[in-house]
Image (tube, rainbow, N blue to C red):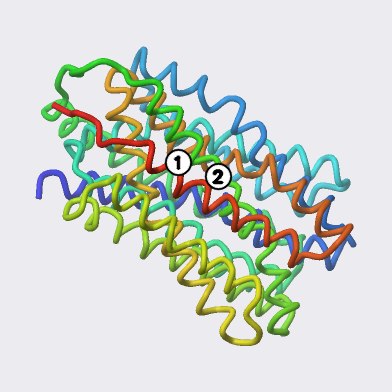
Amino acid sequence: MRRLRPIGLMAVGHACVDVYQGSVPALVPFLVAERGLGYVAVSGITLAATLLSSVVQPVFGVLTDRRPLTWLIPVAMTTAGLGIALIGVAPSYWLSWLAAALSGLGVAAYHPEAARMARAVSGGSHVGMSWFSVGGNVGFALAPVLVTPILSAGGLSLTPVLIVPALAGAVITRLALRSAQLVASSNQSAAAGADDWSSFLRLSAIMICRSIVFVGLGTFIALYAGQRVGGGTTTGGVALFVLFAAGAFGTLLGGRFATRYGRVRTLRSSYAVAVPALAGLVLAPGPAFFGFLAVTAIAMSIPFSLHVTLGQDFLPSRVGTAGGMTLGLAVSIGGVATPVLGTIAEHTSLRLALSTLIALALTSSLIGHALTEPETA
């Protein structure tokens, strides 16, 4: 019970941050409808939200390994929300691009320190870290539920309203930090073992493939759902909710499966299941599309919290860096590849662009066979 309250509050804060990562794909149909942007242009918005995050995230990880930066957590939340709030009211495409980049900077600043605190608070528990990680999935899932009705009612001019979760999350997190630090101080112990960079790099390759798949689906699944099922932006919002909600369920399953079967075995099996699920998602007609989407999201999300604990155990003396890579960089770096998917879609079809993701899921499963469970204290 002593650990439950801090990790629960930190999970709520994680949700409030990652709602802004989920907001970017939820904004895509409205940017297309109101501003006439093409696949490459909306991919650029996703790129803006993820590129800066990808570049600076390791820097924040190194800083948090040197000294605690707990004050940065609520500040980063507010910055992430401010960027999304400005996207819809910016008078030009490039100002919207910069607003998306500002949001990405906030996301980058949040994850390394928050991951370090979550590990300390949970005592390194797989289940505890899965609860923290699922906060991010819940944030992703709530994004279309929050964004779609608001923008359907008033268009892009209402994006300033979207700053509210950031402000609420900053208040909650600030109040939670004191109790979290008290629990963390009792759970902290000296790092044991040497850093295993070769295993961490293999894990990073898996996470990059996973990121490209998940960010690619998040960016284009709303548009693809409209093509496959019909229904316009409403169907797109439902597809995004299924993607992120099923992902949250999968993240919780990951902690349970890892405790029972081991992290590496769970990781390999989950990515193997994702391969046929993605194929069905791309090819299945009508309502079956949503079933394959749910299975894909679950299979791709089961390893998510396991990436975090594996990364921190591979780099026991650099848990901030490992947390920033596994929770932040490995999520955001997929946006760098999104314009490539947009280019393929514009020159061929969106179906062909999404088909390329199947090979990446297969790659993650195969690389998983080169991993072994780390020795931990």
Query: Residue at 80% of width from left, 60% of height from top?
Result: 31
Query: Residue at 67% of width from left, 69% of height from top?
Result: 222
Q: Residue furthest bottom?
A: 286
Q: Which quarter of the figure has residue 67?
A: top left
Query: At label 1, which amino acid type do we have?
Result: Ile
**In the visual, does 82 lie left or right of 295?**
right
- Residue 338, how many percent across, how many down? 71, 48
How many discs appear? 2
Q: Is residue 153 above or below residue 125?
A: below
* Discs 2, 1 touching: Cβ within 8 Å: yes
**In the visual, does 138 lie left or right of 213?**
left
Q: Secondary structure at mark 1?
A: helix
Q: Nearer the viewer, mark 2 or mark 1?
A: 1
Q: On residue 367, which mark appears?
A: 1
Q: Mark 2 packing: few (<14 Cα in 10 Å), some, or many (20+)?
A: many
Q: Which quarter of the figure has residue 171?
A: top left
Query: At label 2, which amino acid type do we have?
Result: Cys
- Residue 142, how many percent across, how many down? 50, 64
287 or 54: which is nearer to us? 287
**Image quadrant for the C terminus?**
top left
Q: Is residue 215 above or below residue 283?
A: above
